[in-house]
Image (cartoon, grey):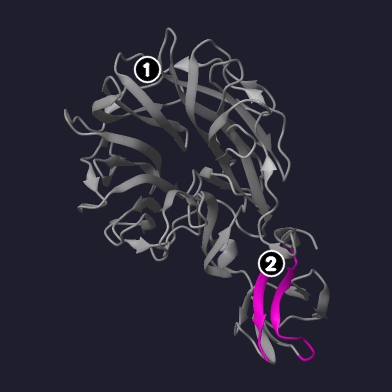
Amino acid sequence: MKRLLLAMFCVGNAWAWWSPSIDLGLSGVDDIHPQACRVQSHGYGRLAMVWESYLDGNADIVSRFSSGPAWSDTFRVTADPGHDICPSIAYDYTRDCFWCVWRRYGAAGAGIYVAQGNEMTGWSAAYQLTSDTLFEDLPSVCVIHDTVWIVWQRGALFGDSISFMNIHAAYYDGSVWSPPCPLTSDSNVINRRAKVGMRYPHPLVVWERDGDIYYCEHIGGSWHTAQPVTADIHENINPDLAHGGDLFGAGAWIVWQTDRDGNYEIYTTAYDTFDVHYRVTFNDAADITPSPLQFQAATRQGGPPVTAFSSDRNGNQDIYTHFNLWPSWDTLLQVDTSQVDDISPVMTASPHYLWVIWQTDRDGDWDIYGSYMGIGGIEEHGLAAMRSAPHIFPNPAKASFILHSAMPVQGIRIYDVLGRLVRTRVFAEFRGMEEISLTGVNAGVYFVIVATNEDEFISKIIVTK
């Protein structure tokens, strides 16, 4: 049953898409601020994750690597007396390594730091990128071709209050790091929570500025003037960015949370002008901290194919995923059903597994948990496989349905929600479109596994009578 039957897991008496939650943190210490990424090239399933862990009474950055549903033991990125917090991670295709960037404070040498490493050699010694006397925080990293780009916020603190905050950027060209360059220079405005990604393919930075979302691009050797994504009286915060990946530069999606509907909902905009906004969630609860799966932004309609977020619609914070990708158009799936707070989700994927990783307090301290589903044909940087995936219609179906596929299909299997095989059919020669009889199949929800020469695809179908 290969890849896609892994997408169904038993939870109580029900079947769910996401696996049972997996503890990925370290026992007995607080683990927070997870980030994750993947190798951005076809055919590879290597993933990496980093987070902030209080191992020795102070915060350090630790990492794990994966080439499947299991993760490696931890690799320490830092082990020093200072506090190393708020990591970000990206894969470098040219150098076949991961880059990790973070903030250090509470010891000599406070500032923004960076290191490179992988699952074979571990991590290099930390390089101090900045040593400014101002407050610096929340760095973000992205690799575009052979250049590493980092952005972060820099400003002034007076007690617990922030006087001002601006966005800065630096890049590595393979030999040296550039001096920090300000993208904003406001004296009494707070610019924060910057994320860097790729667009067409040059750097794109998105951030939060006094309750609105702004972006800026590096084109022709310089940073252009910042432009607003939102400009209204509502609170637009916690932006994130999905882009095409190093090998498949294209458009980009921006996602964020806004209270324009009376409560926090997730919105997105995409591709070219960022002037058309799409609402992703619809409810009376607070949906916050969206994290999109990195994917090639082929069209602006509908938003990122998969977005994770945290929601209090059940009375506590839980992790949800919104699918906007065939065969699950506009599908909302709860990842975890615990009665504790699950927050700060991030997403990544290999050609075989889609992962959500988040922070939770279910074990008496903060910990890192993850959940995965088996997938076929979905990769972080392309929609080509899904465009050619088999289609089933109509859905709901009654006496039969039509299977259409541009790829040769070997056969199908139909399972009920208890995992029992109820129908099989083998094609000696698939003609591109076949009618599948549902005679003898009771009304209910079923899963159709379509086997091609290289992959298996799963679709959920409702049978009515």
State the separation of the CA atoms marked 1 and 2. 48 Å
- Given residues 441 and 215, the one toward you in this image is 441
Q: State whether residue 382 appears in this view.
A: no
Residue 451 included in the magenta stretch of the image? yes
Q: Earlier in the sequence, mark 1 or mark 2?
A: 1
Residue where numbered disc 1 is placed: 130
Neighbour tally class for label 2: few under 14, some 14-19, many 20 plus, Cα within 10 Å = many
What residue is drawn where x is 55% and y is 11%? Answer: 80
x and y percent of residue 319 in the render?
A: 54, 51
**Of the numbered discs in the image, which one, if any, rests on residue 30?**
none
Q: Amino acid at mark 2?
A: Phe
Q: Is residue 101 left or right of residue 77?
A: left
Q: Amino acid at mark 1?
A: Thr
In the image, residue 74 sits, relative to residue 352, either above or below, namely above
Range of magenta residues: 439-465
The secondary element bearing badge 2 is classed as strand
Q: State whether residue 229 appears in this view.
A: yes
Q: Residue furthest top?
A: 108
- Residue 120 quadrant: top right
Q: Decide whether the magenta segment is chiefly helix, strand or loop.
A: strand
Quadrant for the N terminus, please: bottom right
x and y percent of residue 294 in the render?
A: 50, 49
Report if the CB atoms under discs 1 and 2 are less than 8 Å apart: no
In the image, residue 193 sits, relative to residue 268, either above or below, namely above
Residue 55 included in the magenta stretch of the image? no
In the image, residue 20 sits, relative to residue 26, either above or below, namely below
Neighbour tally class for label 1: few under 14, some 14-19, many 20 plus, Cα within 10 Å = some
What residue is drawn where x is 37% and y is 57%? Answer: 267
In the image, residue 59 sits, relative to residue 347, either above or below, namely above
Q: Is residue 231 left or right of residue 361?
A: left
**Of the numbered discs in the image, which one, if any, rests on residue 457?**
2
